[in-house]
Amino acid sequence: MPATEILIPEADIQSRLTELAAEINAVQPDGPVHVVMILKGAIIFGVDLARALERNTTLGFLTASSYGEGTQSTGRVEIDARHLGDIEGRNVLLIDDILDTGHTFSKTLDILGDKRPATLRTCVLMDKPERREVDIHADHVGFTIENHFVVGYGLDCDEAYRTLPDIRIYAPE
């Protein structure tokens, strides 16, 4: 299996989730939060984080893709916002799995901003700043990692490895 080296163990992820929820709750206005997850990669992290917030949350979803098959981005971002939900005037938390080049994150923030939420905060499980091509940052970051292609805890390579409980470095054989 080309994904055997554990980069972030499951226990570290779960511990950091609790910390992130506290950080977010400390700055998020009182009341409900509409959590928007970028699918498919953020689904496991997003659901776990939404539960850890321990407040009234509603869920919305975007699908975004720039990888297709393989480990290299195509540079072309495709976003489907049909399942976003109504966010006008609401407190919104955007959750993604990884902030890499920044193209997907930037385009997603533009789409959400155009829908006039009351507040818009962002959280990513992992940040890979050395790959950044767009000047953008997340409000909350779980882990900052080096330039590895990673899988597990929702992240995949050609749809494989999403259900691993930890984050692993993917190294094709």
Image (cartoon, rainbow, N blue to C red):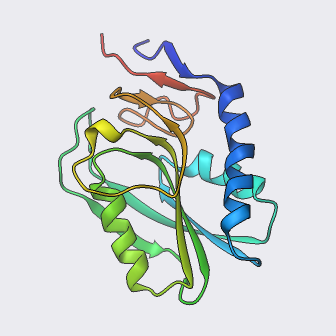
Report the front residue among 141 and 94.
141
Q: Is residue 48 above or below residue 110?
A: above
Quarter holding the N terminus is: top left
Image-based side of 116 in relation to 9, left or right:
left
Q: Residue at x 57, y 51 (%)?
A: 43
Question: Across the whole image, how many numbered discs are drawn on residues?
Answer: 0
Q: Residue at x 63, y 22 (%)?
A: 9
Residue situated furthest right in the rendering: 54
In the rendered image, residue 128, in percent from the top left (x then y), is placed at 37, 38
Quarter holding the C terminus is: top left
In the rendered image, residue 27, in percent from the top left (x then y), is placed at 67, 66
Image-based side of 33 in relation to 92, left or right:
right
Q: Is residue 22 above or below residue 34?
A: above
Task: Please tell me in which quadrant of the rendered image residue 34 appears.
Answer: bottom right
In the rendered image, residue 75, in percent from the top left (x then y), is placed at 17, 50
In the rendered image, residue 121, in percent from the top left (x then y), is placed at 54, 67
Q: Residue at x 49, y 29 (%)?
A: 161
Image-based side of 18 in relation to 93, left or right:
right
Image-based side of 15 in relation to 139, left or right:
right
Residue situated furthest front in the rendering: 27
Q: Residue at x 33, y 44 (%)?
A: 100
Q: Is residue 46 above or below residue 19?
A: below
